[in-house]
Image (cartoon, helix red, strand yellow):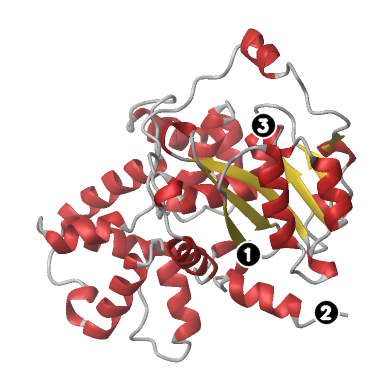
């Protein structure tokens, strides 16, 4: 039997562990997903505050700090000013260390001096002395929730189900081409709520390319949301506006009128099932880097929203082999029949 070479857990491994814990998977199930022994996952969770407080970013920082104490001498980023400048620019645009490291391979395909790992970037940030530069670079890292949300009781879920949207198309009726992302033009949507839940920002994400549209809203009632979403989606070529998957929020209660206006069917996810709109949920986490909780969206200018949208779509994504959503989406627009 071939013996596997041991490698440390990566930030991607820790993200899988965090998602698995959120879904209440066993350590054995999570271990199979990352091809590790169950004991590795159990030890990792135990050493990072347990099942209900585990956070992938916190665990990664802790591991890198321990690595940093064992390493001496100058680091690569301290010796290559051009590389350091590229890393700083990426962090200030809210790119993750992994996104920066992988994008370097595309932008400098033949320059081996412009190579660095995501873990080295994390380590570089956290061993910097305290000061303005460190604060700026840390702000560029993706934020994480302080607490894992407790699962809702059956009574709470029943309460949420009252007043269901009429004539909904269930996500179970959605064509297979949507689920497996073989055909572009299928979108996921949601609202990001602002301060005291009085204002909101609409978010639309294309499932294949992760191209994102941020929709300014003057209100969050059904009619306002329907008209704003329809206006944005009608500008797209027909082959890139096929369907929309949404949660059961009341703002989508005018889904029939939306379908008539756009030709796009709306499929509704099950209550309290954010993983059924995983692309949108993940993108909303990125959007929160630009508009943290407590943002009053009625005070945010359209120019600021457009800037955030441009940065999101200009951000290299692992799922796209570190191309940007802009690059992937533009290629599809060019194929307009």
Q: Is residue 181 left or right of residue 302?
A: right
Q: Is residue 153 left or right of residue 314?
A: right
> Which badge, 3 or 1, comes first in the chain's sequence?
1
Percent of width and height locating residue 39: 46, 32
Q: Mark 3 packing: few (<14 Cα in 10 Å), some, or many (20+)?
A: few
Closer-to-camera residue (42/336)? 336
Seen in the picture, residue 17 relative to 184 is either above or below; the reply is above
Question: Extreme top residue here?
Answer: 155
Disc 1/disc 2 C-alpha distance (Å): 16 Å
Disc 3/disc 1 C-alpha distance (Å): 22 Å
Q: Which residue is mark 1?
A: 211
Seen in the picture, residue 251 relative to 76 is either above or below; the reply is above
Q: Where, quadrant-wise, is the C terminus in this rendering?
A: bottom right
Q: Quadrant of residue 123?
A: bottom left
Percent of width and height locating residue 169: 87, 37
Residue ID at (67%, 18%):
160
Query: What SS does tag 1 mark?
Result: loop
Residue ID at (78%, 62%):
185
Q: Which residue is mark 2?
A: 336
Residue ID at (70%, 57%):
207
Q: Quadrant of residue 333?
A: bottom right
Percent of width and height locating residue 315: 49, 68
Query: What SS does tag 2 mark?
Result: loop
Closer-to-camera residue (144/53)? 144
Closer-to-camera residue (337/178)? 337
Regarding residue 296, the answer to whether it shows in the image is yes
Query: What SS does tag 3 mark?
Result: loop
Percent of width and height locating residue 178: 82, 53
Q: Which mark is residue 273?
A: 3
Residue ID at (70%, 38%):
222
> Which badge, 2 or 3, comes first in the chain's sequence?
3
């Amino acid at each position: 039997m071939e013996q596997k070479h041991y490698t440390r857990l990566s930030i991607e491994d820790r993200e899988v562990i965090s998602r698995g814990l959120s879904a209440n998977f066993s350590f054995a199930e999570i271990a199979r997903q990352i091809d590790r022994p169950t004991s590795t996952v159990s030890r990792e969770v135990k050493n990072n505050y347990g099942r209900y407080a585990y956070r992938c970013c916190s665990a990664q920082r802790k591991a890198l700090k321990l690595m940093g104490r064992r390493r001496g001498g100058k680091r690569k980023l301290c010796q290559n000013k051009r590389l350091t400048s590229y890393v700083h620019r990426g962090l200030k645009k809210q790119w993750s260390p992994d996104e920066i490291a992988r994008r370097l391979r595309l932008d400098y395909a033949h320059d081996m001096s412009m190579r660095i790992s995501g873990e080295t970037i994390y380590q570089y940030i956290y061993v910097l002395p305290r000061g303005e530069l460190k604060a700026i670079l840390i702000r560029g890292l993706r934020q994480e929730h302080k607490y894992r949300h407790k699962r809702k009781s059956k009574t709470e879920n029943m309460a949420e189900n009252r007043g269901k949207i009429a004539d909904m198309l269930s996500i179970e009726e959605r064509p297979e081409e949507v689920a497996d992302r073989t055909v572009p033009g299928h979108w996921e949507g949601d609202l990001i709520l602002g301060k005291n839940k009085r204002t909101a920002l609409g978010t639309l994400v294309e499932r294949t390319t992760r191209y994102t549209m941020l929709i300014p809203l003057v209100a969050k009632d059904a009619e306002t949301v329907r008209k704003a979403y329809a206006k944005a989606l009608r500008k797209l070529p027909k082959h890139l506006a096929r369907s929309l998957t949404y949660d059961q929020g009341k703002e989508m209660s005018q889904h029939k009128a939306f379908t008539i206006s756009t030709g796009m069917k709306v499929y509704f996810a099950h209550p309290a099932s954010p993983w059924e709109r995983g692309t949108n949920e993940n993108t909303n986490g990125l959007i929160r880097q630009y508009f943290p909780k407590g943002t009053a969206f009625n005070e945010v200018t359209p120019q600021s929203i457009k800037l955030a949208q441009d940065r999101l779509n200009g951000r290299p994504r692992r799922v796209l082999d570190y191309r940007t959503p802009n690059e992937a989406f533009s290629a599809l627009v060019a194929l307009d029949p």
